[in-house]
Image (cartoon, coloured by chain):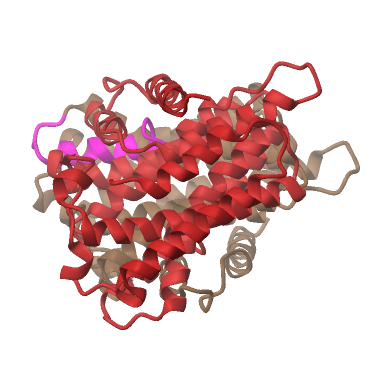
Chain colours: A brown, B red
Amino acid sequence: MDFAAELKRHVARLEQGLDLHLPAATTRPARLHTAMRYTLAAGGKRLRPVLVLATAELFQSVAANAREPTDPLPAAVAIECLHTYSLIHDDLPCMDNDDLRRGRPTAHKQFDEPTALLAGDALLTHAFALLAEGYAGQPTLAHALIRELADAAGSRRLIGGQMEDLLAEKKSDATAEELEFIHLNKTAAMIEAALVMGGLLGGERPGPTLALLRRAGRHLGLAFQIIDDILDATADTATLGKTAGKDAKADKTTFVKLHGLEASRRFAAELSAAARSALVTLPGDKSFLFALITAMAARSS
Amino acid sequence: MDFAAELKRHVARLEQGLDLHLPAATTRPARLHTAMRYTLAAGGKRLRPVLVLATAELFQSVAANAREPTDPLPAAVAIECLHTYSLIHDDLPCMDNDDLRRGRPTAHKQFDEPTALLAGDALLTHAFALLAEGYAGQPTLAHALIRELADAAGSRRLIGGQMEDLLAEKKSDATAEELEFIHLNKTAAMIEAALVMGGLLGGERPGPTLALLRRAGRHLGLAFQIIDDILDATADTATLGKTAGKDAKADKTTFVKLHGLEASRRFAAELSAAARSALVTLPGDKSFLFALITAMAARSS
């Protein structure tokens, strides 16, 4: 398995999907659709949609039945729309007030605040519309995918994590428990959902296999966020493609601040190993997923 | 049929549903869930959820089959969550910058901007989660409801109307065509969806009956918005429960500015009549829906 080539294949497929499954930039109102596409097109790691595509392929490659495999692309695009909405809203002046994202001006800098707000709202809504449209012929699957995504993105998880993150920023003494709540929900929830949605698209129904995928996502998500904290403390803005050193400047509680760099690196490595362990009993060739977990742990941006 | 008593019954049912189908205010993070409930609890006309409940009952009252009727309450709560998110985001400083809504401080005044932004995001997400959870036993129905709501709330309709409304505010010479695009999408889309979702809950499948409901919603929605424009020009803030006279102050293009008060009133009356006509061939006792249309045309707030 050539990891770089496989990753490139999944990312290229996703990027074709973004073009295919978003309204054209010229669709009325053009300013709104242009803004939606602007942030989506800015790239990034595409971790969540790649997890959807790779996990769906894993299960489809070993499926005993001969029916046509379900296309995982609408779901991969939907999860990237949802992730991108959360970035646009996080970057707004009343939130993190960030000018730079993925090396380009953030949506409210490139357009304006109301357009960025509405583009975020529209990407969130489009994620659900796309799951409903893209799997209209399989309403039970559409329903399961929507339920999974709505739960992961909801007030107890993604948005709840974001809310506690904002509250924690106002005090410099957030506890380890509060920090774990934030990371589990702000970051891990969507990575869990990506793996579980991949399983659903591969034909899995609720049961121990989806539970293993969820556990792998939880570990991978926590590892991912700890590495984000490490990179914020150690990398420079040009490498990151977003403003570096923000956490220390804001005296924000992070894994690095609570536990130090060395312990944070060890913890991230342990979580990556735990993510691999959760996947090991799954059927099929997991080498791409294993390599992806390794690459995420070793990333520099 | 006692219209006031029937309306009160539907509103009371909806308000019980809001309490039942939203996370408790104490659910972590409590600040977020408190803010979600704050704006939902502020009242308002509850037009969209009442249309869902009344339309579902209309079809269920004449259904030939004896199976247990589907509970329309989760869908009624979902559409009110979606409407309320749109109000919270519209009121934000970067949008209409309004301090007052339904006679109470807007969410960003009562809490703060980030909390209001996230409460809006969470209500939007909760609308879809609730449709997925509330109709988990009927995934085909859940799918149809989600598809309808996501389309009505999406970038081509509700959010698209909001975007063009913002663009129109920047110029004082919006055309009648632009104004109709705004009203059809910013207001009528969700009223169409309310009627269509009521039909789906009542057991209707896509076909001429749902098309009639959609047409009635389009007329009622346009009438509703024209009356909003008339009230903004003629009523006072205390009666409206929101800031009056904003349109003229902003030199905003409205039906009243384009066509004058008299023609706007006539147009609203014609649209209300057209909404009634679209419903007239439906089965069952439509007297509540007819009276609701009349009440909306005669409202003073």
Question: Is A87 positioned to the left or the right of A125 in the image?
Answer: left
Q: Nearer the viewer, residue A57 or A132?
A: A132
Q: How far across and how far down the image is residue A27, in percent? A: 53, 74
Residue B41 occupies which quadrant of the picture? top left
Q: Is B254 colored magenta in this rendering?
A: no
Q: Residue at x 50, y 45 (%)?
A: A293
Q: How far across and how far down the image is residue A273, in percent? A: 48, 34
Q: What is the chief secondary structure element of the magenta stretch?
A: helix
Q: How far across and how far down the image is residue B116, in percent? A: 24, 44
Question: Is B274 positioned to the left or the right of A30 in the image?
Answer: right
Q: How far across and how far down the image is residue A42, in percent? A: 42, 70
Farthest right residue in view: A66
Q: How many marks?
A: 0
Residue A153 occupies which quadrant of the picture? top left
Q: Residue at x 54, y 42 (%)?
A: B194
Q: Which residues are magenta?
A: A150-174
Instruction: Note whether residue A81 is visible.
Output: no
* Above or below, A6 relative to B167: above
Instruction: Note whether residue B43 is visible.
Output: yes
* Above or below, A189 relative to B215: above
Q: Residue at x 40, y 24 (%)?
A: B8
Q: Is A157 colored magenta in this rendering?
A: yes
Q: Nearer the viewer, residue A99 or A260?
A: A99
Q: Nearer the viewer, residue B13 or A117?
A: B13
Question: Is A278 positioned to the left or the right of A245 in the image?
Answer: right
Question: Is B112 positioned to the left or the right of B136 in the image?
Answer: left
Q: Nearer the viewer, residue A15 or A153?
A: A153
